[in-house]
Image: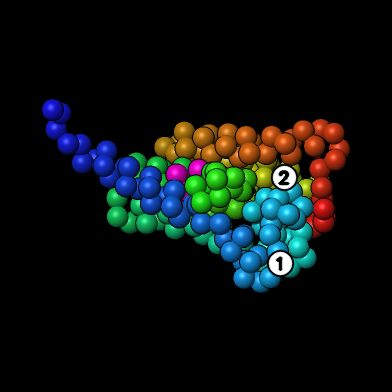
Amino acid sequence: MPPFDSSLAVLILWAVIGYGLGSIPFGMIFANAMGLGNLRDIGSGNIGATNVLRTGNKKAAALTLLFDGGKGAVALLLARLFAGEDAVQIAALAAMVGHCYPVWLKFRGGKGVATFLGIMLALAWPVGIGCCIAWLIAAASTRTSSMGALGAAAASTFLMVFLGYGYALFLGILLTLLVFWRHRANIKRIRAGTEPKIGQKG
């Protein structure tokens, strides 16, 4: 029988912690708490801040954005505090997967934008700020949240290389691919010119 690998056990533990934190559906929690109805029956049916905004409640949308970003950052920072850099990246990836595919919601979660930005800010704040700027530019110029998300994700890997955070490049690529995968329906609508604008209901 091979010896027990404690380092692997630590990584598994942080994967579980990251997934657990990431899978908390704050959008649904705030929508229910504020009597906004079931997010599955509103707009795109997504649980993220953009769809919460379609309820007309900006406070709920802001809280969802803050907490969805915060859970990714918290997972990463806890791993950084109590374990090594490998655990940091595992926890971050697991938090993103947890948000996108939460077991509590039959693996039908959000698209991961706020969680992605929270992870980037906690992982390497200059990269995170760059991603936020990229989101703002793309979203403001097109008035579509999905274009902001795609712009931020695409910018992340270039920012990591340019700003000297190459050690996390593989994580950045995985997170970027996940953001693009979760937005594949949005990409089709963007090409068709039917993607809803920010704040648009329905």
The answer to whether any part of residue 63 appears in the image is: no
The image quadrant of residue 15 is: top left
Q: Amino acid at mark 1?
A: Leu
Please state which of residues 41 and 154 is positioned toward the viewer in this rendering.
41
**Residue 92 drawn above or below residue 191:** below
Crowding around mark 1 (Cα neighbors within 10 Å: few <14, some 14 to 19, many 20+) is some
Three-letter residue code for mark 2:
Ser
Identify the residue position indicated by label 1 in the image. 36
Residue drawn at 82 percent across, 53 percent down: 202
Relative horizontal placement of residue 163, taking residue 146 as reference (left or right): left
- SS of the residue at dot 2? helix
Residue labelled with disc 2: 146
The secondary structure making up most of the magenta span is helix
The location of residue 121, given as percent across then percent down, is 52, 53
Q: Residues within 10 Å of mark 2 (few under 14, many from 20)?
A: many
Q: Position of residue 17 (x, y in %)?
A: 38, 51
Residue in the image at 78% along x and 48% along y: 144
Which span of residues is magenta-colored? 94-98
Secondary structure beneath disc 1?
Answer: loop
Any magenta on residue 109?
Answer: no
Q: In the image, is residue 82 above or below residue 94?
A: below
Residue at figure coordinates x 53%, y 39% from the top left: 175
Residue placed most toward the observer, 86 or 3: 3
Give the distance between the C-alpha atoms of the residues marked 1 and 2, in whole angstroms: 23 Å
